[in-house]
Amino acid sequence: MTAPLHVAITGAAGQIGYAMTFRIASGEIFGAHRPVVLHLIEVPPVMPALDGVHMELDDCAFPTLAGVEKYDSDHLEQAFANCNWVLLVGSVPRKQGMERSDLIRINGPIFTNTGKAINAAAAKDVRVVVVGNPCNTNCLIAMSHAPDVPKDRWFAMTRLDQNRAQAQLAQKAGRPVAAVSNLAIWGNHSATQYPDFVNAKIDGRPVTEVITDHAWLKGDFISTVQQRGAAVIKARGASSAASAANACLDTVKSIITPTPAGSCASAAVFTDGKYGIDAGLMCGLPISSDGENWRVLDGFHIDDFSRSAIQKTVDELKQERDTVKDLLP
Ligand code: LMR
């Protein structure tokens, strides 16, 4: 019998956590033959709701679910003990009229203890995906408090933006979403992010050849993707949940599954100066995985339009890093 994977989820009874938990337990993410033990984490007042999630997990009778452990967020070291994956969802969501960066002084401090607990207790091969906003900078905070966990194990979620951008391009081109590939999101998961239509493809052809309305590509396409989270909040009265959960799981899948040739996955990862982007940030970049290891893809064409868009979002990341410098050791 294969040893179970231990997967921790913070905010596990919240809308995003709830949407993710059952898909992980079902075997969809790590495979039908890989048992998982879920470590479900919530703030103390929400622990009764977590009992309800646990009951429902039992009631699904998933053959791949090898165990459920519940922890309150005052006991993070126990919660993360031996975890191979840590999905950091728990955080205060933004409300209508806010930018994600408005949450930085509210959510940022949560991630210092989180990073320390991961450092102290998680499995040697732990990988971490941050969903709680502002996710890039929260990830930077957690990572900086976990000096023993290699920096290539940390990811912040720009996959939701990739998925949104793919859907917009597919609809404009009148093609299925699966026809869109190589879609990179550069920078911050924020209103400055740059969804890169220059390198993206539809049916293997450059998007700029298939969609000849370049004013739309440079205008409404980008702003729709940048503002999609706010549009969902306005429509639902609450921030995205199922699509955010889906994007977190897509992030995990794209790290553990080989990336198709000629394409990329989008995730925010720690920068080392590649593409002229300042080192020491968590920045959305095009990545590729062989199923074991991932790397930042080389060779993306950066024209003047892209360069200026990338610079703007990188500048915002630098500004966020400055805002939380007291939280960085
Ligand atoms: C999203 O993009 O939908 C999430 O990051 C939630 C938000 O605040 O926009």
Image (cartoon, helix red, strand yellow):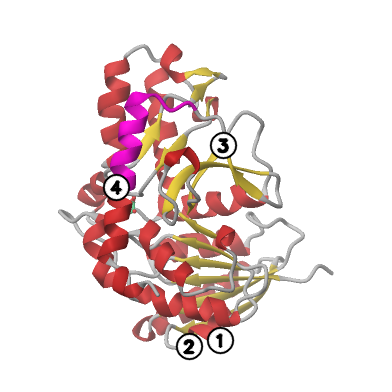
How far apart marks 2 and 3 lie (CA) works out to 37 Å
Asked whether the beta carbons under mark 2 and mark 1 sit within 8 Å of each other, the answer is: yes
Q: Is residue 305 magenta?
A: yes
Magenta highlight: main SS: helix
Please give the label number shown on residue 40: none
Residue 274 is at least partly visible in this image? yes
Residues drawn in magenta: 301-314
Look at 34% across and 60% down and name the residue there. 133
How far apart marks 3 and 1 lie (CA) works out to 36 Å
Q: Amino acid at mark 1?
A: Gln
Q: Which residue is mark 4?
A: 315
User: Is 145 placed left or right of 230 in the picture?
Assistant: right
Mark closer to the chain start, 3 or 1: 1
Look at 39% across and 15% down and name the residue there. 211
Secondary structure of the residue carrying tag 1 is: helix
Nearer to us: label 3 or label 1: 3
Under 8 Å from ligand 1: the CB of mark 4?
no
Q: Which residue is mark 2?
A: 75
